[in-house]
Amino acid sequence: MNKLLNVSSSPHARSSVLTGNLMFDVAIAMVPAAVYGVYQFGLKALCVLLVTMAGSVLSEYVYESLMGKPITVMDGSALVTGMILGLNMPPEIPLWIPFLGSVFAIIVVKQIYGGLGQNFMNPALAARCFLLISFASQMSAFKLDGVSGATPLSVLKNGGRVDVAAMFVGKIPGTIGEVSVVALLIGAAYLLYKKVISIRIPAAYIITFAVFVFIFGEQDLGYVMAHICGGGLIFGAFFMATDYVTSPITPNGRIVFGVLLGILTGLFRLFGGSAEGVSYAIIIGNLLVPLIEKVTLPAAFGKEGKKA
Amino acid sequence: MNKCMERLYNGIIKENPTFVLMLGMCPTLATTTTAVNGMGMGLTTTAVLVFSNLIISCLRKIIPDRVRIPAYIVIVASLVTIVQLLLQAFIPSLNESLGIFIPLIVVNCIILGRAEAYAAKNGPVESAFDGIGMGLGFTLGLTCIAIFRELLGAGTVFGVTLIPEAYKITIFGLAPGAFFVLAGLTALQNKFKMPSATNGAGGESVLACGGNCSHCSGSACMANHATLETRRLQAEEDALAAKKAAVAQKQTELSAKLDKKDN
């Protein structure tokens, strides 16, 4: 009996999915929106996108080399953060502001808390809110074809009417990535097809938001559609609320998270001072994720249901 | 006199109330919007702190132990009232911009903390110097934070414009900016290991709390420390006794051997 049966320690089953692949898929999914943004707003938008992406990757590289940590630039997470941040910027912004934002996102929000997987809120969104508070006028100066104009949401807030079809295609002033609902939906379909994201968070988010707006806003289909297509809602629901690190991992928790985001966004948009509400709603939702996960923890396999 | 210098060093660097002890956070975060405000708040607190330490130290044998906190509060509140009236009379602009935070010096934890931890146990001269050291340390901390916040948030330092209007980062003038700057400066202070009570450079200690018991009097930490101390002494005694026993045994063995040889 000399034969020893060696068993390696767990995990025994390994998945071929790597962080790099996932991030690459997310980056591909954002390409349609980015291309449309560059097509509509011109080279300035491209510059903003390049600055945020380069800024994020560079700050990650510099911070990790200075701190003597393993360099994780190649997993693409910094690139995706930079891309999301860039798509959240108005195209006319002076380039040093997006650069400052990407440094803030990577160093303060992501790396100081321990790097990828440890950040408690979405770095790109935290940076966007940081910039929104710091540079209120530059961050909300939107132009379309050289003419500055109010975003559809501001028009709605002031009681005006908007063209939903133009919003769906993207012929409206706004940030680089949020304007074209069609381009965003193509990217979202790709992510859903590749099973990178689940439909639970976006669906719960958008449906709750629609119901909220219908009840507390105007009981009019055009109005509700304009609210759904306007601002960063579609972009936020599919690309930012579904961030792996800052969204719940439990299936039921995702629905709770989506409903919460829908209510918060509705509250901010209809009753808040600003016309936008997606960024703040998602950030506040991020903070509640640990609590949501704690409440919605499923029972382990083989365990009986709750005993009285 | 050496003791007094030690108190000054202790207050400004080693146990800096802002960056090391993390005391008085409320005025630190709220009044550091401009360098003038930060420095004004620091100096006002210093004035109160020096006199409260002095008076409390003089009265430490008269104040009954059971009512010492109310007694301290009465002393501090009287001093704060005097300082507030003086500010109203001579520097009304500072009084206006600091607002409610002047009366709130009464409940500033640095002042009560120093009264409890130092003035109530030491003589008047040392206590006054302790107040000066702690007060200057607080002023230094507040001024540093305020200079950074004013520079980044409004582009000015002490009212002198250094950064053009278009490049200011408004958030540093608001509450989140106060937290960013405080955290950043504390991190720098720890990184460059200015010897302080929290980064282990202030003295060798194996205890997690740093072993400085002057600011946890009366808490469980004190009891823990006493237990550890007695245990250490006990262990030393045991080791000594064992050594002695071993030596004695060797001696008897040696003498026995010698006896055998002699025989």
Image: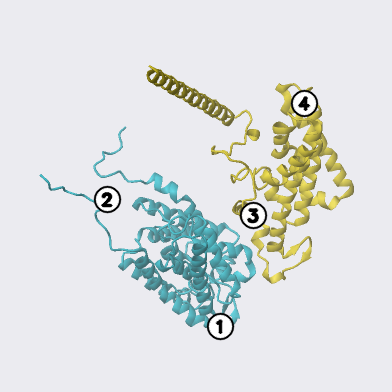
Chain colours: A cyan, B yellow
Residue on which the image places disc 1 = A145
Q: Say which of marks 2 and 1 sits in front.
A: 2
Residues at marks 4 and 2 on the same chain: no
**Badge 4 sits on which subunit?**
B
Q: Amino acid at mark 3?
A: Leu
How far is mark 2 from mark 3, CA to CA?
44 Å
Identify the image quadrant of residue B36.
Answer: bottom right
Q: Quadrant of the C terminus of chain A?
A: top left
Q: Amino acid at mark 4?
A: Arg
Mark 2 or 1 closer to N-term?
2
Q: Is residue A195 left or right of residue A204?
A: left
Residues at marks 1 and 4 on the same chain: no
Determine whether the residue tagged by mark 4 lies in a helix, strand or loop: loop
Q: Amino acid at mark 1?
A: Asp
Q: Is residue B135 left or right of residue A84?
A: right
Determine whether the residue tagged by mark 2 lies in a helix, strand or loop: loop
Q: Residues within 10 Å of mark 1 (few under 14, many from 20)?
A: few
Residue A188: image location, x then y, percent: 37, 69
Give the residue displayed 69% in from the left and 33% down from the top: B117
Determine whether the residue tagged by mark 3 lies in a helix, strand or loop: helix
**Badge 1 sits on which subunit?**
A
Residue B185 circle label: 3
How far is mark 3 from mark 1, CA to CA?
45 Å
Q: Say which of marks 1 and 4 sits in front.
A: 4
Image marks 3 and 4: residues in contact by CB distance under 8 Å: no
Q: Image height check: is B184 above or below B99? A: below
Residue on which the image places disc 4 = B60
Q: Amino acid at mark 2?
A: Ser
Give the residue displayed 49% in from the left and 52% down from the top: A287
Is residue B31 something that shows in the picture?
no
Q: Quadrant of the N terminus of chain A?
A: top left
Residue on which the image places disc 2 = A10
